[in-house]
């Protein structure tokens, strides 16, 4: 049995404060410049996702299989991004 998917929207860096989770999808609204999103396994943990994105666009990034397991979702870099929504369970 799988658990319910939840989501959290952020507009900057820092912890999503959701505890242990599996990242299932990320939805990003990028601004101008050179958009980049980096997510780590908690504050100071290993980088688990590092994306360079197209400027001034909307991006939906699906994570295959069981997603990316982290102790906490931490947005380490959010350069030239308007908003990031993370779907997790």
Image (cartoon, rainbow, N blue to C red):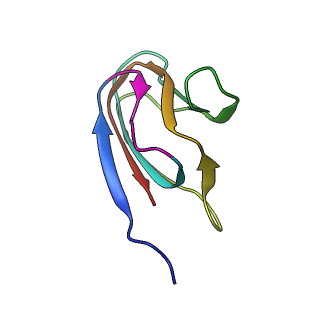
- The vertical placement of 30 against 62, above or below, is above
Q: Relative to residue 82, is residue 50 drawn left or right? A: right
Residue lying at the far right in this picture: please name it: 46
**Residue shown at 70%/29% (left/top)?**
46
* Observer-nearest of 24 and 58: 24
Residue 46 appears in view: yes
Question: How many callouts does the rendering have?
Answer: 0
Query: How far across and how far down the image is residue 73, in percent?
Result: 50, 38
Residue 30 on image: x %, y %: 37, 30
Residue at (51, 32) in percent of width and height: 53
Quadrant position of residue 47: top right
Residue 6 position in % (x across, y down): 34, 59
Quadrant in which the C terminus is drawn = bottom left
Residue 20 x/y as whole percent: 53, 48
Q: Magenta stretch mostly in which secondary structure?
A: loop
Query: Is 62 within the magenta?
Result: no
**Residue placed most toward the observer, 49 or 17:** 17
Indicate whether residue 13 is drawn in magenta: yes
Vertical placement of residue 45 versus 9, above or below: above
> Between 66 and 28, which is closer to the camera in this rendering?
66
Outermost residue, bottom side: 1
Tell me what residue is drawn at x 43 percent, y 15 percent. 33
Q: Which residues are magenta?
A: 12-19
Q: Is residue 59 visible?
A: no
């Amino acid at each position: 049995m799988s658990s319910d998917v939840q989501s959290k929207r952020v507009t900057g860096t820092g912890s999503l404060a959701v505890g242990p989770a599996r990242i299932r999808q990320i939805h990003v609204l990028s601004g101008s410049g050179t958009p980049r999103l980096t997510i780590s396994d908690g504050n100071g943990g290993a980088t688990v996702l590092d994306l360079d994105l197209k400027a001034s666009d909307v991006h939906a990034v699906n994570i295959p299989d069981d997603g990316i397991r982290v102790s906490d979702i931490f947005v380490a870099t959010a350069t030239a991004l308007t908003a990031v929504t993370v779907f997790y369970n």
